[in-house]
């Protein structure tokens, strides 16, 4: 599991801007080398209801990137837990059991991007 903390990143001018007087700034969450080579299987805007969690599961050949849009969650990957907040991201490699729990009294929304290499990201739910 790779964690990217939004507050640790610096805003820099976008590459298409005048670096002396940029019109737009960016924080680079992920670079090509951070991700599995493959194809995008899905990009989801998801909602995790207050005080809820999704079932522990893994994907046989899919890396997932989660970007938290609001609130606070605990992401467990192979029994290692990390707390994430607005703007934070986590990369979950293939074959790693993961589960996310909403730690707040409001719905948490997040973006989930799946990158698969072979079998379309087959999901295995852990009972």
Image (tube, helix red, strand yellow):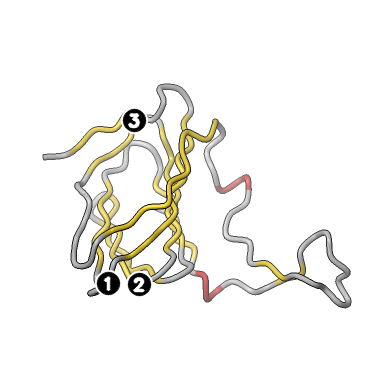
Residue placed at 25% from the left, 65% from the top?
102
**Residue 125 pos. (x, y %):** 20, 37
Mark 1: secondary structure: loop
Residue at label 1? 106
**Residue 82 pos. (x, y %):** 32, 65
Mark 2: secondary structure: loop
Residue at label 2? 71
Residue placed at 62% from the left, 51% from the top?
31
Instruction: Give the side of residue 9 with respect to residue 45, left or right.
Output: right
Depth check, mark 1 against mark 2: the one in front is: 1
Q: Earlier in the sequence, mark 1 or mark 2?
A: 2
Q: Which mark is residue 60?
A: 3
Residues at discs 1 and 2 in contact (Cβ within 8 Å): yes
Instruction: Give the side of residue 87 with respect to residue 37, left or right.
Output: left
Residue placed at 54% from the left, 44% from the top?
35
Q: Residues within 10 Å of mark 1 (few under 14, many from 20)?
A: some
Determine the image quadrant of residue 118: top left
Q: Quadrant of the C terminus?
A: top left
Instruction: Give the side of residue 33 with respect to residue 83, left or right.
Output: right
Mark 3: secondary structure: loop
Determine the image quadrant of residue 9: bottom right
């Amino acid at each position: 599991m790779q964690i990217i903390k939004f507050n640790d990143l610096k805003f820099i001018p976008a590459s298409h801007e005048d670096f002396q007087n940029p019109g737009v700034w960016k924080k680079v969450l992920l670079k090509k080398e951070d991700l599995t080579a493959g194809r995008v299987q899905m990009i989801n805007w998801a909602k995790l209801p207050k005080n809820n969690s999704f079932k522990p599961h893994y994907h046989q050949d899919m890396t997932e990137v989660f970007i938290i849009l609001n609130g606070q969650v605990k992401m467990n990957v192979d029994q290692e837990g990390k707390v994430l907040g607005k703007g934070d991201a986590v990369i979950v490699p293939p074959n790693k059991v993961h589960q996310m729990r909403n730690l707040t009294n409001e719905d948490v929304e997040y973006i989930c991007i799946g990158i698969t290499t072979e079998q379309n990201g087959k999901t295995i739910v852990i009972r």
